[in-house]
Image: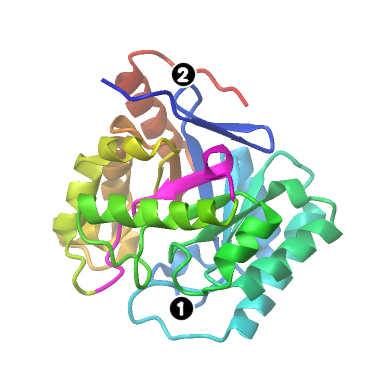
């Protein structure tokens, strides 16, 4: 039996049990990314974003730094430069003011700079921060989030991104990040989304941990916040299929997406915003809820 109904509303977008599973499209500015076809240049980002929205995305995730294992480190200044160029084009060129745009960063300096750009373009309400470190990398970020009061996606971590091992530890680490914000006066129940950190973020993260999280995804309902799942072309799919090349993990991604939706995901973060992904989500969602879910805001 499901626990109490899960729901948040961010800038008019309802996310939760009684609403369609939302699709977050990845706009990857990092040339260090593990999936090279996901990389967009500033000159093409607006067209890519519009195509994702037309294909069903209601959220976009803009990231200037790769967090894949072994990716070369870049400076915070370089990350800011990448995000600035892309955001100015997006915020000026997107005529859809209902789309949520998350900034995938672990650093206060980048988040603050991005928020200023949103404010400059009059689109502050569309801003979200997405921190894969669960507020662990930059100790100033939690206070900043609490002070500005903006929505946040928190990924499970306790020392560095994705280092939570197993469902119990993942739940504990997510709860700790939320409690940190609450102590600072932030109301997480109204505008937070949790991410259980699927992926081989550290060498110890073997595929078994990802399989366990997806199999036991319902356990994360205990936190009573929407659950974001990011399985797109990740290494555990490659391990299962024997495919080292992320280009060859699309159908495996669709399979994992269906399982994630069936087991309770409210948001799917993906490189592939297309008819195939939409169809898989809709069918898995209908089976899980035993009803056809109509589009609604």
How crowded pointer 2 is (Cα within 10 Å; few <14, some 14-19, many 20+) is rated as some
Q: Is residue 244 magenta?
A: no
Furthest residue in direction top, as rendered = 291
What colouring does the structure picture have? rainbow
Q: Which residue is mark 1?
A: 32
Q: Is residue 182 or residue 164 the one in the foreground?
A: 182
Q: Quadrant of residue 155?
A: bottom left
Question: Image height check: is 18 above or below 236?
Answer: above
User: In the image, is residue 145 above or below residue 253?
Assistant: below
Residue 194, x across and y down, in percent: 43, 48
- Report the disc number at residue 158: none
- Up-down relation of residue 156 to residue 191 (above or below): below
Query: Where the N terminus falls, by quadrant?
Result: top left
- Give residue 293's mark: 2
Count the marks: how many? 2
Region of the chain picked out in magenta, as a range: 186-202
Q: Residue at point 79% right, 44% down?
A: 95
Which residue is at 43% across, 57% downward? 177
Tell me the residue at 70%/47% (across/down).
126
Secondary-structure class at tag 1: loop
Residue 187 lies in the magenta-colored region: yes
Mark sitting earlier along the chain (1/2): 1
């Amino acid at each position: 039996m499901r626990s109490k109904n899960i729901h948040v509303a961010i800038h008019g977008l309802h996310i939760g049990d009684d609403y369609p599973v939302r699709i977050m499209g990845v706009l990857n500015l990092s040339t260090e990314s593990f999936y090279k076809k996901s990389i967009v240049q500033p000159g093409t980002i607006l067209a890519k974003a519009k195509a994702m929205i037309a294909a069903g995305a209601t959220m976009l995730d803009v990231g200037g730094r790769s967090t894949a294992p072994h990716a070369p480190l870049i400076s915070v200044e370089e990350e800011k430069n990448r995000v600035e160029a892309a955001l100015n084009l997006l915020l000026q060129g997107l005529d859809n003011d209902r789309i949520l745009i998350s900034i995938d960063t672990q650093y206060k300096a980048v988040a603050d700079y991005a928020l200023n750009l949103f404010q400059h373009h009059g689109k502050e309400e569309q801003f979200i921060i997405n921190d894969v470190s669960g507020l662990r990398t930059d100790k100033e970020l939690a206070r900043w989030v609490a002070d500005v009061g903006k929505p946040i996606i928190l990924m499970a971590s306790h020392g560095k991104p994705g280092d939570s091992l197993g469902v119990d530890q993942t739940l504990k680490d997510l709860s700790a990040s939320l409690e940190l914000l609450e102590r600072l006066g932030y109301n997480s129940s109204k505008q937070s989304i949790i991410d259980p950190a699927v992926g081989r973020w550290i060498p110890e993260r073997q595929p078994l941990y990802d399989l366990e999280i997806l199999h036991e995804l319902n356990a994360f309902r205990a936190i009573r916040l929407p659950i974001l799942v990011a399985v797109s072309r990740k290494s555990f799919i490659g391990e299962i299929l024997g495919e080292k090349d992320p280009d060859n993990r699309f159908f495996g991604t669709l399979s994992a997406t269906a399982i994630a939706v069936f087991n309770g995901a409210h948001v799917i973060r993906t490189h592939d915003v297309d008819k195939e992904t939409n169809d898989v989500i809709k069918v898995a969602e209908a089976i899980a809820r035993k009803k056809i879910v109509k589009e609604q805001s």
